[in-house]
Amino acid sequence: MTTTATLTDTRTFEEKLDLFAQVAVNVGLGLKPGQELVMTAGLETLPLARRITEQAYKAGASLVTTLLTDDAMTLARYEHASTESFDYAAKWLYDGMAAAYASGAARLAIAGGNPELLSKQDPDKVGRANRAVSQAYRPALELITRHAINWTIVAAATPAWAASVFPGEAPDAALAKLWEAIFKASRVDGADPVKAWKEHDANLHTHAARLNEKRYSALRYRGPGTNLELGLADDHLWLGGGGTAKNGYYCVPNIPTEEVFSMPHKDRADGVVTATKPLSHLGTMIEGIQVRFEKGRIVEAKATRGQEVLQKLIDTDAGARHLGEVALVPHSSPIASSGLIFSNTLFDENAASHIAMGQAYISCMKDGDKLTDEEQVAKGLNQSLIHVDWMIGSSELDIDGVTATGTAEPLMRGGEWV
């Protein structure tokens, strides 16, 4: 059978990488002339980081500052540093990042780390290091969760990540396949990526608007290993796609994104929920997660792999045992349809409906930024040092929207919008 060559086939890798950088800067960040950019990236993601830097300056950035990490240096700490040192984080660095955001800098992160990097390390050290970083990063995180600045996260293929997604493939082939999967999921493989993103963004806003019209008081989940009633915060808002930050700049925080999301009430979750995909968190893999909620709090948590890491995670602080986000994603999303397990939350959370333990996004509460902390909490906002998404959606998951009068209406069936 004869087939017509696609546009993707005619573009070189370098051309697609450059288009991806343009999408990251102009669609994801919405970077404005004169604005600073703070970017974090791993050493192995440098090809994309360099292209993004170039596109940022073309867009008028006044300064691009990139903070690099290295897997070998990270492992050196776990192998040689004293146990006590894992309670320490570079607060001066995170204070500097918070100061940059407060002064108007945009934030871009390039994901793509080895999902198994710390899997063989002491879970106690991993947990202590995570807690120390979470505490030090809190001032910067608050500016992000309040949507005070324009920010986005994109991904770059790396050899270790590619080997995890395509086990058994030759390294070069695995890396090439992962890049193609990233380009496709990020809508870089079409004739006009920017136009494609505008259309997709509008579609996500339509779903969010319908949910905001319904004003459900709760969501009811039914599926294999899942029987959960999840109350929504008072004056919650559903969001999807991009939004205008408090600085007036429009951005799409995740590239790719397929979700509409809102704020659960921190004290209104009851029942059992089971993960449908593994969670890669800070270089460790957690699989087979199942938790039981009572009055919004995780009272029992199990995992078939990474149990100690999961326990350390939910013990970070009081808010870590409560939910800060609920997101709906159709099972037919392009990422789910790829059939790949990315072992990367940026992708896997956009392949399945999910929930997040920890800090809520204040932008998901009507006029939330005008309320005091006490008023926010009274309406159901959860506060925590962490925000960790994990996936619960599948082709077997049914979700009902529950009205204020207690009537249940079909919202998703078999993982798809009704």
Image (cartoon, grey):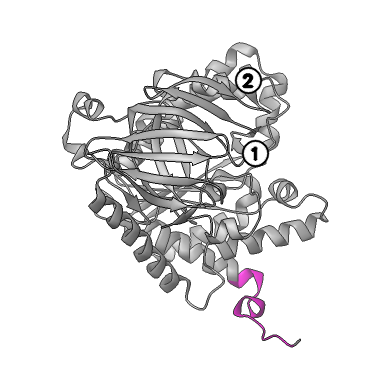
Considering depth in this image, is 51 or 233 the residue closer to the camera? 233
| Residue 55 x %, y % | 47, 64
Q: CA distance from mark 2 to mark 1?
A: 25 Å
Say whether residue 1 is magenta. no
| Residue 341 x %, y % | 65, 49
Q: Secondary structure at mark 1?
A: loop
Please name the amino acid that badge 2 sits on. Glu
Query: In this figure, which residue is indicated by the disc labeled 2?
Result: 308
| Residue 348 x %, y % | 57, 48
Looking at the rendering, the stretch of residues picked out in magenta corresponds to 2-15
Q: Residue at x 39, y 38 (%)?
A: 325
Q: Crowdedness of circle 2 by 10 Å Cα count: few (<14), some, many (20+)?
A: some
State left or right for residue 216 relative to residue 29: left
Residue 357's label in the rendered image is: none
Please name the amino acid that badge 1 sits on. Asp
Where residue 297 sits, quadrant-wise, is top left
Quarter the C terminus occupies: bottom left
Up-down: is 352 above or below 127?
A: below
